[in-house]
Amino acid sequence: MGKSLPSKNIHFVTGYARSGTTLLASILGRNPNIIATPETCFFEHLYKSNGYPKKREVIRSRFLKDLNLESEVYDRNNSCTELFIDGVTEYSKSKPSAGVIVEKSPHHLCFIRRVSKEIEGSKFVVIVRDPRAIYSSLHKVPWSHNSISRFCAEWNARQKYLNDALLDKGLKNKIHVIRYEDLLSNPKSEIEKVCNFLGVVYSDSMFNVAESNIVPSWEREWKDNVNKPIDKSKIDSYKDKLSASEIDKITKLCSMGMESFGYIGSNSHEKKSLYMRILESKLYRNARLYIKRRRVYE
């Protein structure tokens, strides 16, 4: 498929589940020039079957229904990419001032390179978080599991997708990485960087706490915190919720990726660029071995 040119700038917020994607998208959606859509999981459904587009599967997705699109939007498109563009563009009409559309779906982390080829001018804001905190947070959701080994394998695989995208010369200046911990510690500074990346003017209104329109009613049980002020205590809250053995196991199994993003090891997070840390990390050198053993999405 060739690139499709949307009438508005369409960008993406993505990252591993429970990394702060909803929080970040909600903050961006409060900018007068940005509208954030509910989670669509569009490209996950599109490519999950051996890489071949399945339009019927996409349309049946309950996530896409959260856009509240009229049936004519589904009928007038020949391609799945056109369906996505028309869908989020139609949704954006509810906020006439918005010239930028931000879609948030964690699993789109696996498809950055594909989506970039499909949608002209798209950019990606990727939020990363300490895997120990992610595992602790996953206990709150009904769709998760309790296997540390499985979680670490999945987290490491997602980092491999991110690393490959960051090292792709064709995606230069199209990916901005933000750490969840930095967002909570220095929210204004970090959001200003994201706004600059997306080409919009920062607004203090982005931190006015208001009910988020991107969280449908069926997800509010585990996402309602986005309607509350930023809480720095969440950065290390996992230490009081996980046992010492759980923390140790996750640290060992995810050590390569954690070192790449500055969660363990020396002060390299401050001294080296993310690009250089990835190039030097064992994660990038060894991740392909894991992917060969267990295929994930692609």
Image: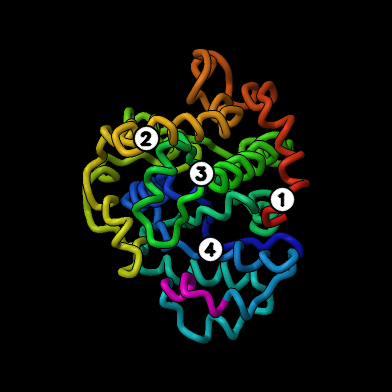
Where is residue 83? Give x, y as percent.
59, 73
Residue type marked 1: Arg
Asked which secondary structure carries label 4, the reply is: loop
Confirm or deny contact between disc 4 and disc 3 (CB under 8 A). Answer: no
Mark earlier in primary sequence (4, 2) = 4
For marks 1 and 3, give the CA distance. Answer: 16 Å
Would you call the spot at circle 4 few (<14 residues within 10 Å), some (14-19), or many (20 or more)? some
Residue 203, percent across and down?
31, 41
The residue at the point 65 percent across, 36 percent down is 163
| Secondary element at image label 1 | loop
Residue at 57% from the left image edge and 48% from the top image edge? 150
Label 3: which residue?
Answer: 148
Q: Is residue 113 left or right of residue 61?
A: right
What amino acid is found at the position of numbered circle 2 in the picture?
A: Ser
Which residue is pictured at 64% across the width and 68% down the height?
46
Q: Which residue is mark 1?
A: 294
Indicate whether residue 65 is drawn in magenta: yes
Residue positioned 31% across, 39% down in the render: 241
Q: Look at mark 2 in the image and give the residue it sits on.
A: 243
**Three-letter code, disc 4:** Cys
Cα distance in 3D space between marks 2 and 3: 12 Å
Depth check: 286 or 20 in front?
A: 286
